Amino acid sequence: MIKTERYRIISRKTALAAMVVTTLTLIYFSLGNTLWGEGVIDGGKIYHGEAAVARDKEITAAFTGLLTEGTVRAIWEKYGPPVNYNNRSTTLEGMTAAAANGGNDNYCNRFVAKWFCDEVQGEDGETVFVLREDLAGSRYLQGNYWFGYAGSGGSGYWDRFLIAYILACVTIAIALCPTFSEDYAFHTADIILATEKGRIRIWWIRILTGAGYASLFYWLLCGIVFLEHLIVYGGESLKVSSSLAGSALYFEKDFMPLGRAILLLYLLGWFSTVTLSILVLAVSAGSRKTFSSLILSLLVYAGPFALMRVVLDMLPMGRVNVFLHYICYAMPFSFPGVFLDAPPEAKGLLAGIALTAAVLGLGLGGMRYCRHQVSRN
């Protein structure tokens, strides 16, 4: 029975088209945008794309390890201030202009300029980076942050994941929304629901099949993003502390290795896609037309976030409005990123709301389907 339901999902032309277009779009975006932003200037010599990544890896290898004040000062002493930091450009023309007077611009000295330098206005009006004299108070130098090369892979990972996640969710909605609506439209529900095990059993089989399909497609797209990251930046980048790699985490946990943060992000996204599959099937169970089921499913997915930004953000932030914000944040569209960067006391509430949404989807959708009245005509 599960094989039959699985075949029903992937055999629909709209679902197949959405899967193919989504996968090709993600591959094009990921491979096309990762290396374009990588550029290194080493003593006035320009490196771009793959060559920049290779050179940055060589430079960073000498400083890889637990971040210390000695590491920061050694980087600054050897490479000095980055010459392509403000209004950074990695086009050939932009890098040529930045390298006109020599100097260096690499992953390491840009890192030091970002976290440990002050910007001072020079006599000629240009911005000058000055390394702070006292670095002892920096929380990044307390012995629990791992420094290493991650390129723009850490800071850009959320963007690539978000694209993969949104594409996966939209495809899941397109593929699953006809599940029950199709039965109503073609009156096959009149036959199925009249059988001895045509209600509860069919509901659970379709829930499991839908969740399984959502999981497989989600992990496929996420796997593409992760594999692309490994190919470009290497596995050693996964050891770098998340905040140093540019990936957002709650500040008390931002020393977590980038690889562990990515795994946590993926697991949160997986939970959200499974929740979305349940909600889409619940919508389908109550919709007699496939098109209306699709529109409602997309509203269930993106509607709470849109409502929050358009309406709730304009209202006074009282307790009720705060709780409504939590509900919107806990919905599949925004749950993975918000949960990852939320303080501990908020994580429990977000998880509870998200789990409640999944349970309500199971219950209300199942009741709607099982109480459908079989046509006697």
Image: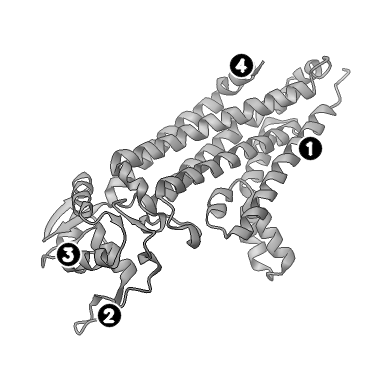
In the rendering, at what x and y percent does residue 305 appear?
A: 61, 53
Helix, strand, or loop for circle 1?
A: helix
Number of marks in the rendered image: 4
In the rendering, at what x and y percent does residue 329 appear?
A: 62, 54
Give residue 120's mark: 2
Of label 1 and label 4, which has the lower sequence position? 4
Q: Which residue is mark 3?
A: 79
Helix, strand, or loop for circle 2?
A: strand
Residue 43 occupies which quadrant of the picture? bottom left
- Are the residues tagged 4 and 3 within 8 Å (C-beta)? no
Residue 125 occupies which quadrant of the picture? bottom left
Of label 4 and label 2, which has the lower sequence position? 4
Question: Which numbered disc, 1 or 3, marks the residue closer to the eye?
Answer: 3
Foreground of the two, 28 or 3: 3
Residue 323 visible? The answer is: yes
Give residue 3's mark: 4
Helix, strand, or loop for circle 3?
A: helix
Quick one: label 4, few (<14), some, or many (20+) residues within 10 Å?
Answer: few
Quick one: label 1, few (<14), some, or many (20+) residues within 10 Å?
Answer: some
Quick one: label 3, few (<14), some, or many (20+) residues within 10 Å?
Answer: some
Amino acid tagged 2 = Val
- Are the residues tagged 1 and 3 within 8 Å (C-beta)? no
Foreground of the two, 161 or 246: 246
In the rendering, at what x and y percent does residue 3 appear?
A: 61, 16
Relative placement, left or right, of 30 versus 102 is right
